[in-house]
Structures are given as structure tokens and as C-alpha cells.
């Protein structure tokens, strides 16, 4: 009797099954949370990139003047880079519209300048127009603000879906644990009755189940979260080779401080949810007795 | 055995007024029971199988609420008590269940120590007490034995020790000699009698062993078809 034997017998097959279910749910929840965060980061980066991309069309001028304009635009405070596109680059851009035959030699092409700006600091449109006016160049400044709004709208829907998945998985985990607690309570009714009739208060009995499911969910949650971490690491270190537009559309998985926080929080949340579910289930069930 | 807390008021340990119990499936099992058990009394409850002995005891150890009537334990009307107060009242009652109700994953000593554990006491503070009590019931060699390895009689004695360990003010025993040989049955009843005389514990024993009852000079309540045919107060029958 030096060490007290737990009043609830150590696990049986039912608890092993519950361990697996909670672990799997925590794995999915952690993965969904990491993916949601990745989606947020990707959305932020992609939105900022689209919004900061400005195309300037210059007509009726020569390349040398256009290069001077590009150099002056690049000096603007909110502009990272201003680059005059080559004929080949313009042909690439027009290829989807003109087909594989290419651009006829005689076709006059406007000069295009690609400008990368930091829209968070300020919109450089007026500054670019001033540079064009000063150089006497006829040109249009085409921003992506409208397009970016549409993209942002789409991405916010994506974020909501990702958050909903996390919420749904969390709710499922809580429901599963509540059912499991109820089943465990029924299976251990003999023990509960003896404790109850021996003068144990409801809280005393509830605490036994709380402790049991807190530990179970914490261990299962940790297992699930570590599995999610491993899958993420696998994606980051071996699957992050996607390039181009498709790469921009993928969630930006990483392994930084907040990802580790998500991994650590997942089992704690599962444990707390299990504890709460167990407590509520036991207290409600005991209320039916005298 | 020095922790007895006598209620100095004149309240009986148990008082039932017009108590009836009806189960949904089987109908009325107890009908209009009036009963008083004085503090420090030693009483037998007898009657044929199915007469309602176990149901009456369940009402007294607060496993069920009566369908009608009033139960008072140590002067407290149980109907008015909150759950916490009911739990505190249960801790004053030791119960020897007919089916023992031992926890199979615990040892004999751990089963006996259960009420003390519920009170929040640490193993070091009760180890010797538990061992003494197990020796008292003749299980000194089986203290750390796993419960399933104990015979029926041994399990019964563990259940008795568990009911006594926290020195209850009221001891309710449902057929406590049902699984032991007559010699051990007499020994158990003598233990109860000794407890009653030395400590003043109120004792109610349900049994259909009339031969055993005759050996003890104690009042007998008799139940028949859910009715108390001899309404007995301590020391006299009415």
C-alpha cells in the first residue's frame, strides 16, 4: 500500500481504441492548424505580391527613353524594382493570345515596364505618372488592386474553410471523448456505485475520470501532434520543390516558433477538452442517483 | 475504536415514517414502513426471500430515495439534504453488501482502506489500522492478496472490514454470514456485538438465519410482502 493503486483500473481495449481516435483527431487538427497558418501566410504573401505588381505601358517612345524612365521610377520611395521587359518577355506574355506562331516582325509593340512596389508603404501610381509626364512619354499605369481584391476575397473563403475544419475536428474530438467517458462510466458503474455509497462526493468521482481522460488525451494528443509535425517536416524538407504559380497557391508550411506552439497546444487543448467532457459527463450522470 | 461520535440529542439513528418504495418494473416492494432504531441499538431484520429486506436496507444506506414517506438519519431528514450533505451522511454509515462489492483490481488491504482514501487520508496514516482490522477478521495472512484470489468467505470478511474501518455510527449488513460457514458466521456476529457494546455503533443485520438470531439477545424486525409485521423499537416489540 506504499503506492496507491488507481481506483479506476488501468486501461482496457476500449481505452486503446479511444487513444487511437483521439490521437488521429489531434493529428488531423494539428495538421489542419498548421495548414491554416500556412494558408494565411501564403495568402498574405500572394496578396501583397499581386497588389504590389504594377505594369506600365509606354507608347511612342524609344527604348533608351524608356530605360531612363525605369531608372527614375526605381528611385521612388515605395518601389523595390522597375524593369523594362525585353521583346522576348513581351512575346511570352502575348503568346497565349497570339498562339505559337509568334508576333509578326512588323507588328509595333508597346514598351512594358514591370514595377514591384511595397503597397504597405504607399501607392506609387502618382509618382510613376509624374515620371512619365516629366519624360514626355505617353503611358498607362495598370495596377492590380481590383484583381487583388478578388484574390483576397477568395483567400478569405479559403481561410474560413480551414478554420472551420480545425473547429470541426476539435468539436469531434470533444464529442468522442464525451461518448467515451459515458461508456467508461457505464463500464465502471460498479466502482462508481461503491465509491458513491462509501460517501465519495460527486467531485471526487468526477476527478478520477477527469484525471484518467486528461492523461489519455494528453498522451494521444502529443502522439498525434508529433505525427503532424513529422508530416509537415517531410513536406517542408522534401516536398517544397514546387515552383511557379502553383507553388504560390500552396500553403506555406514552415517550422517556426508558432508552428511549434501549435504542436504543443494541440495535446493540451485535447487534454483540457477531455477533462471538461469527462467532468460534465460524470457530474450529469451522478445527478441521476440519490 | 475510540472515534464514536454519539449524538447526544435523543434522536434515533434511523427513523422511518410511512415509507414506501415502488420500483417501475416490479411495483411496490415496501409499504408504509414505520421504524425506529435507537442509537447504540443492535437489531436483526429478517423475512423470507423477496420480502423487501435488501430494499429496506438500501433506503437506509441512501442508495435509493423512498417513493413516499420520510427517512431521518441521526435526526436529519434525508429528503432535505444536499448532495454534499448526503455524501457526508453516507460516510457515517458502514455497509456490508450482500454481494460484497469489492473492487477486483485492488488488494484486500486497499479495499478495506477505500473509505479512508475517500476521506483523503494518506496510505502511511492508515496502513497499520487496516492491517489490524484485517487481522481482527482473521485475514492477517491475506493483507496484500489480490481480491479475485480470495475465497467467498474471505471476500465477505474484507467487505466487513471495509464497512468498519472508518468506525461508522451505523452499520448495516445485508446477509453478512451468507457466504461463510456457521462457525465463521457466529464469529462475525460476535464481532458486531462486541463493536456494538464497546463502541456503541448502531447495528442492523439482515439475515434469514433464524438459528443464528436465536443465539443473540436482540430485537428482531420481520418483513413480509413489503410490510413490517413487527414494528420494533430498541429493546421492545410493539
Image (cartoon, coloured by chain):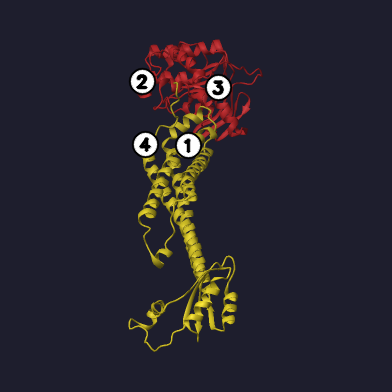
Chain colours: A yellow, B red
Name the secondary structure under disc 2: loop
Task: Decide: few, some or many residues near mark 1? Use Cα within 10 Å; few <14, some 14-19, many ≥20.
Answer: many
Label 2 sits on residue: B150
Indicate left or right for B9 with B25 as reference. right
Observer-side mark, 3 or 2, equals 2
Visible residue check, residue B6: yes
Q: Above or below — where is B184 with respect to B13? A: above
Name the secondary structure under disc 4: loop
Name the secondary structure under disc 3: loop
Q: Earlier in the sequence, mark 3 or mark 2?
A: 2
Return the x and y of residue B224 as percentages of the image width and height.
47, 26
Label 4 sits on residue: A12
Return the x and y of residue A89 as percentages of the image width and height.
40, 76
Answer whether labels 3 and 1 touch (C-beta < 8 Å). no
Label 3 sits on residue: B231
Query: Do tags 4 and 3 sit on the same chain?
Result: no
Answer whether labels 1 and 4 touch (C-beta < 8 Å). no
Label 1 sits on residue: A209
Return the x and y of residue B171 as percentages of the image width and height.
52, 20
Visible residue check, residue B45: no
Q: Mark 1 to mark 4: distance in Å?
A: 14 Å
Identify the residue at the far bottom of this view: A106
Q: Above or below — where is B180 with respect to A18? A: above
Observer-side mark, 3 or 1, equals 1
Identify the residue at the far right of this view: B9
Relative to the observer, which residue lies in front, B21 or B2? Answer: B2
Q: Mark 3 to mark 1: distance in Å?
A: 44 Å
- Answer with the quarter of the image where residue B186 lies: top left
Tell me the quarter of the image containing the N terminus of chain B.
Answer: top right
Q: Mark 4 to mark 3: distance in Å?
A: 49 Å
Answer whether labels 4 and 3 touch (C-beta < 8 Å). no
Task: Decide: few, some or many residues near mark 4? Use Cα within 10 Å; few <14, some 14-19, many ≥20.
Answer: few
Amino acid at each position: 500500500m506504499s503506492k496507491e493503486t488507481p481506483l479506476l483500473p488501468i486501461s482496457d481495449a476500449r481505452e486503446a481504441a479511444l487513444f487511437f481516435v483521439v490521437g488521429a483527431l489531434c493529428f488531423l487538427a494539428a495538421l489542419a492548424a498548421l495548414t491554416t497558418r500556412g494558408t494565411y501566410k501564403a495568402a498574405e504573401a500572394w496578396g501583397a505580391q499581386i497588389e504590389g505588381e504594377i505594369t506600365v505601358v509606354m507608347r511612342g517612345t524609344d527604348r533608351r527613353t524608356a530605360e531612363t524612365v525605369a531608372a527614375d521610377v526605381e528611385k521612388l520611395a515605395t518601389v523595390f524594382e522597375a524593369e523594362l521587359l525585353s521583346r522576348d518577355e513581351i512575346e511570352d506574355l502575348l503568346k497565349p493570345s497570339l498562339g505559337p506562331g509568334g508576333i509578326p516582325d512588323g507588328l509595333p509593340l508597346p514598351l512594358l515596364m514591370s514595377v514591384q512596389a511595397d503597397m504597405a508603404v504607399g501607392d506609387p501610381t502618382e509618382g510613376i505618372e509624374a515620371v512619365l509626364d516629366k519624360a514626355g512619354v505617353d503611358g498607362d499605369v495598370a495596377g492590380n488592386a481590383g484583381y487583388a481584391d478578388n484574390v483576397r476575397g477568395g483567400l478569405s473563403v479559403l481561410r474560413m474553410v480551414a478554420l472551420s475544419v480545425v473547429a470541426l475536428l476539435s468539436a469531434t474530438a470533444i464529442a468522442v471523448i464525451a461518448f467515451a467517458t459515458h461508456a467508461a462510466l457505464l463500464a465502471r458503474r460498479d466502482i462508481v456505485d461503491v465509491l458513491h455509497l462509501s460517501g465519495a462526493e460527486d467531485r471526487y468521482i468526477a476527478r478520477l475520470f477527469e484525471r484518467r481522460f486528461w492523461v489519455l488525451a494528453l498522451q494521444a494528443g502529443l502522439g498525434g501532434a508529433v505525427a503532424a509535425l513529422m508530416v509537415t517536416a517531410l513536406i517542408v524538407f522534401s516536398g517544397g520543390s514546387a515552383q511557379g504559380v502553383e507553388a504560390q497557391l500552396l500553403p506555406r508550411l514552415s517550422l517556426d516558433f508558432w508552428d511549434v506552439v501549435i504542436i504543443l497546444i494541440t495535446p493540451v487543448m485535447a487534454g483540457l477538452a477531455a477533462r471538461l467532457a469527462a467532468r460534465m459527463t460524470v457530474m450529469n450522470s451522478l445527478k441521476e442517483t440519490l | 475504536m475510540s472515534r464514536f461520535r454519539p449524538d447526544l440529542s435523543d434522536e434515533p439513528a434511523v427513523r422511518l415514517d410511512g415509507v414506501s418504495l415502488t420500483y417501475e418494473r416490479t411495483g411496490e416492494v415496501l409499504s408504509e414502513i414505520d421504524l425506529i432504531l435507537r442509537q447504540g441499538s443492535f437489531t436483526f431484520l429478517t423475512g423470507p426471500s423477496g420480502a423487501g429486506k435488501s430494499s429496506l436496507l438500501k433506503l437506509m444506506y441512501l442508495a435509493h430515495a423512498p417513493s413516499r414517506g420520510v427517512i431521518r438519519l441521526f435526526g436529519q431528514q434525508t429528503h432535505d439534504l444536499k448532495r454534499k450533505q448526503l455524501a457526508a451522511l453516507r460516510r457515517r454509515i458502514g455497509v456490508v453488501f450482500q454481494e460484497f462489492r469489492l473492487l477486483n483490481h485492488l488488494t484486500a488491504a486497499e479495499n478495506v482502506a477505500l473509505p479512508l482514501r475517500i476521506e483523503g487520508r494518506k496510505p502511511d496514516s492508515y496502513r497499520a489500522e487496516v492491517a489490524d482490522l484485517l487481522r481482527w477478521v482473521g485475514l492477517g495472512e491475506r493483507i496484500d492478496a489480490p481480491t479475485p484470489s480470495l475465497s467467498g468467505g474471505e471476500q465477505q470478511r474484507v467487505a466487513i472490514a471495509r464497512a468498519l474501518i472508518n468506525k461508522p455510527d451505523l452499520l448495516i449488513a445485508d446477509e453478512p454470514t451468507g457466504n461463510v460457514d456457521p462457525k465463521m458466521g457466529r464469529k462475525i456476529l460476535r464481532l458486531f456485538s462486541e463493536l456494538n457494546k464497546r463502541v456503541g455503533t448502531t447495528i442492523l443485520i439482515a439475515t434469514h438465519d433464524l438459528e443464528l438470531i436465536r443465539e443473540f439477545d436482540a430485537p428482531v424486525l420481520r418483513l413480509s410482502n413489503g410490510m413490517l409485521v413487527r414494528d420494533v423499537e430498541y429493546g421492545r416489540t410493539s
